[in-house]
Structures are given as structure tokens and as C-alpha cells.
Image (cartoon, rainbow, N blue to C red):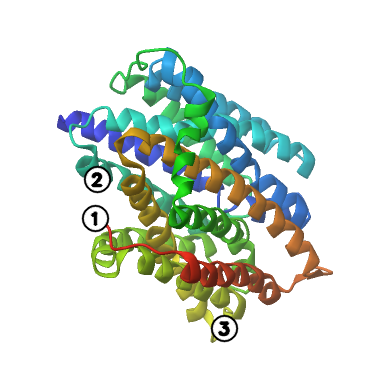
Amino acid sequence: MKLSTRIQLMVMMFLQFFTWGAWYGQVTKYLGTALGATGEQQGAAFSTFSIAMILAPFFVGMVADRYFSAQKVLGVLNLLGAGILWFLTQASSPDAFFWLLLAYCLTFTPTLALTSTIAMSQMAKPEKEFPGIRVLGTIAWIVVGNIIGNMGFGATVTIFHLAMGASVVLGLFAFTLPDTPPKAGGPASIGQILGTDALVLFKDRSFLIFFLSSVLICIPLSFYYAMANPSLTDSGMTNVESKMSLGQASEVIFMLLLPVAYNRLGVKWTFIVALLAWIVRFLCFGFGDAGSGEWILYLAIILHGVCYDFFFVTGMIYTDNKAGERIKTQAQSLITLATYGVGMGIGSYISGILKDMFTTGSTVDWRSFWMFPAGIAAVILVLFIAVFQEKKTTNV
């Protein structure tokens, strides 16, 4: 790959995740502070991303992937999304905000697959070259988190102004990216998009348990994404967005440690370590405070790397190994739809309802709130240990 192309792809990935990171972790805080939304309204708004994640593959697989160059679709979607973000900044009620955020997410979620497609199409060995490009996305998330935290933008409409600006820049920049023509052949079938051919993997009990565990763990995962920011803010922690970016930094570190853990522990125990980390993390959110217990909150944030990488990245590797070359793409599509779509969608909505349940006046009992996802993770851990059986798989 030419250096100029590499730089283009790195800039693309940086702008993509700068846009996402500008609003994603802060949206519930903004809703509660600026628009006076209830917990249920906050959870419902956060679930729009999951709804869009379910619908996005149909657009990419049946339209964008087959009839138009990927970089042009990326450009149009970003410019359209920026326009919707402008209207969203004018929303004065949680109900109007919900529908505008859903419309925006429908333009944004397809770009996650498109940026990966554009990048990988320029690579001779994606498995070696892609991480060096993708890491710019993590760096962007850290950068925008620190901008928002240090400037005190977390509960203001400025988070959407930042996303809008980055989206406009990426929308224009996308038309300069290397041409990524549509794939040959007609549109993908519904079965290909949903990954139904991969259902044959459910004959393997261990894969079925892994699949169900992945869906269920996404319920507490969405608790973190949706409610960690307002919880940390209520605890008295300052500069929350900057400190939460430590989670993305730990993601990079644990990604580097994953091959060692995977090879030494094997699949089952790597998953178990991740599930244990989820339990510890939620307990830390529940029992930490911004005084003498602030180190506990830092631990909860930093555990993001082992929680995410050791479960979800290991899961991608495990799925590839189990599926084989013929159906691995469909298997990954099935996992993505079920986790980021169904699991996180359910979790987002439930998190909002529980926040209301544990709210008295203007005070949220966050300790009781965080015991719920900790309990879910504990149940998944027990079932996983009892039922999942897998020999140590291929080295990575």
C-alpha cells in the first residue's frame, strides 16, 4: 500500500470515530440535563443505535454494496447525517430528539461497515495491515473525549456540533478516497444479510452457549455505554469524559495482551476472565465515589479493555475458527445483529427503566442500579462455566 493511501485511510478512520465518540457516550447525560428526559426516555433514545444496527446491513448488503462505490456512499451518508444533526440540535423535547437521533443513526451505522470495506480493499494482507489503520479510530475517541471533558461540553449541545463538523469533513473527504467499486453480482439475499446459513453452527452446543452469552452480555454492556457517564457525574467525579477515555486506552493495551492470554488460557478461560471482569467492573461502579473511593471508579473505567477485548474480540476469533471459510462472513453478521442489535437494544431500554425505578426525586441510587448488570454477568458466568466445553483452539 502506498504511503499516501495509508494516510488517507488513517484520516478516514480518525474522522469516523471522532464523529461517533463525540456524542455516543454523552447523549444520555445531555438528554437528562438539557432536555429533562426521564430514564426511560434516555434508554429509548440510546436504543436507536441498536435499531439502526439491525437495519443497516440490509442497506449495505442490498444497495450500497452492490450498486455504488463505497467511498461515494460514505460521503453522501456523512453529509446527510450532518444535516440531520443540525435539526437534532434544534430539538426541544425528548420525543422529537428520539426520532431525529434514529434518523441520524440510520445514516451513521452503515458507515461503520463502509469504512472497513474501503480500508480492507486497499490491503494485500488485511489481518496484518488493518489494525494499524483501525487504531486511529481508538485514538480519535480518546482525543474527542478529552476535548469534551476538558472543555466541559458533556451535557451541552456542543457534542453534536463536534459530530456535525467531523461528519461534514469526512463527507467531503470521502470523495477523495481510493475508488472501491461495488461487488459483482446482484444484491445480497435476506439470508446472507441475516447470516442464516450460519445457523448450522448451533448444532455445536458450545457455540450455541457462546452465542447466547454474547447476546446476554450485551445487555449489561449497554448499561455501561448508556449510563456510566451520568453515574460518574453524579458520583462527584469531574472531567468525566476525559477520564472515561482511559477505557479506550486500556482497549489498545489489552488488545496487545490478547494473543498471549488466548494462547495460554484457551478460549473458555479467556471468556471467563472477561466475564469476571464485567462483574468486578459493575461492582466498582456501584461502590466507588469521587472521594476516597475514586480509585475504584478508575478501576471500573480501565477494566473496559479486558471486558471488551477478551470477550468480543476473542469471540470474533472463535467464530472464525468454528465457522470456517465458507460461512465465516455470515457467522460474523449473525453475531453482530444479535449482539449490537438485539442485546444492546434490550439493554439500552431496560437501563432507562431501571434508572427511573431507582430514582427518588432528583437522586439516583446508582449502587442498586449497578447491581443489576453485575447480577446478569454473574448468571452468565455460572452458566458459561457449567455448559461451555471447548478444547484450546488455533493459536493467534
Q: Which mark is residue 64?
A: none
Residue 260, percent from left and from top: 23, 65
Of marks 1 and 3, which one's residue comes earlier in the chain?
Answer: 3
Q: Nearer the viewer, residue 258 or 237?
A: 258
Residue at 53%, 41% in the rendered image: 337
> Disc 3 designates what residue?
291
> Disc 1 designates what residue?
394
Residue 136, percent from left and from top: 32, 45
Query: Do the residues bearing badges 1 and 2 touch, measured as CB atoms within 8 Å?
Result: no
- Amino acid on which the number 2 mark rests in the picture: Gly
Residue 114, percent from left and from top: 41, 29
Q: Nearer the viewer, mark 1 or mark 2?
A: 1
Q: Is residue 264 left or right of residue 339?
A: left
Residue 162, percent from left and from top: 52, 41
- Amino acid on which the number 3 mark rests in the picture: Gly
Could one spot residue 280 in this view of the protein? yes
Few, some or many residues within 10 Å of mark 1 (<14, 14–19, 20+): few
Query: In 3D space, how far apart are the residues under numbered discs 2 and 3 (Cα atoms)?
Result: 39 Å
Of marks 2 and 3, which one's residue comes earlier in the chain?
Answer: 2
In the picture, the quarter occupied by the C terminus is bottom left
Considering every residue shown, the one lying at the far right of the view is 361
Q: Quadrant of residue 230?
A: bottom right
Few, some or many residues within 10 Å of mark 2 (<14, 14–19, 20+): few
SS label for mark 1: loop
Q: Nearer the viewer, residue 304 or 5?
A: 304
Could one spot residue 93 in this view of the protein? no
338, above or below 61, in the image: below
- Amino acid on which the number 1 mark rests in the picture: Thr
Query: Do the residues bearing badges 1 and 3 touch, measured as CB atoms within 8 Å?
Result: no
> Disc 2 designates what residue?
132
